[in-house]
Structure formats: C-alpha cells, structure tokens
C-alpha cells in the first residue's frame, strides 16, 4: 500500500511509481494529479497550439514559480521540463 502524501497528491500509488522511476517531485505530482494521466490517446493539445493564458493557467496549476514574467515560449519550455 502506498504512503499517504496528503491532500495535494490525488493518486499516491502513481506518484510513488513515478518517483521510483526518477521523476522530480513536481513532475510526479503533476502526473499523479491529472485525472486522465493513465489513459492513452494523446487528447491534450500541443503546447504551441494553446494561448499564453492557457499555458499560464497550467503553469499555475502545476505550481511553476516565476510564471507571470515568462513569455509563451518560456512557459512551454518550463512545462515540458518540469
């Protein structure tokens, strides 16, 4: 049974598995908290097709710091590498 990581992590088992694979805490939390992360199908639109506001909102949800000063390309880079 997975350790309870508190209310900020919605899927503790998935979070622990991702951390065991070497992912950062932020990235593992982001994936574990995405309701459809385990589903296949690639339904998410490309970052380049999204507006800066949509990217900003996702960065806020993920908890990226400094997002208010980032350009669209910087937001894309931060979301991909975090």
Image: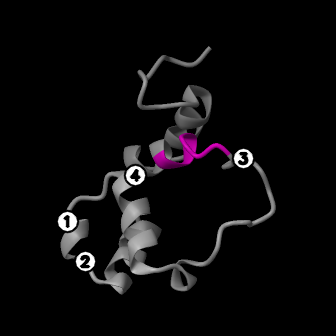
Q: How is the image coloured?
A: one colour
Q: Which residue is mark 2?
A: 70
Counting from the top left corner in percent of width and height, residue 76 is at 42, 77
Label 4 sits on a secondary structure element that is helix
Q: Which residue is mark 4?
A: 61
Please state which of residues 77 and 22 is positioned toward the viewer in this rendering. 77
* Crowd band around label 3 with a 10 angstrom C-alpha radius: few (<14), some (14–19), many (20+): few
> Considering only vertical position in the picture, is 50 above or below 65?
below
Q: Are marks 2 and 1 in contact (CB under 8 Å)?
A: yes
Mark 3 vs mark 2, CA separation in Å: 29 Å
Q: Which residue is mark 1?
A: 66
Quadrant position of residue 35: top right
Quadrant position of residue 7: top left
Q: Are marks 3 and 2 in contact (CB under 8 Å)?
A: no
Which region of the structure is painted magenta?
Answer: 30-35
Q: Are marks 1 and 3 in contact (CB under 8 Å)?
A: no
Disc with the residue nearer the chain's start (1 vs 3):
3
* Crowd band around label 1 with a 10 angstrom C-alpha radius: few (<14), some (14–19), many (20+): few
Q: Is residue 32 magenta?
A: yes
């Amino acid at each position: 049974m997975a350790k309870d990581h508190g209310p900020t992590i919605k899927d503790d088992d998935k979070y622990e598995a991702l951390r065991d694979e070497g992912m950062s805490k932020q990235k593992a939390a982001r994936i574990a908290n995405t309701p459809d992360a385990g589903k296949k199908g690639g339904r998410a639109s490309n970052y380049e097709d999204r507006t800066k506001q949509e990217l900003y909102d996702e960065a806020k949800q993920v908890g990226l710091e400094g997002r208010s000063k980032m350009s669209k390309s910087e937001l894309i880079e931060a979301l991909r590498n975090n």
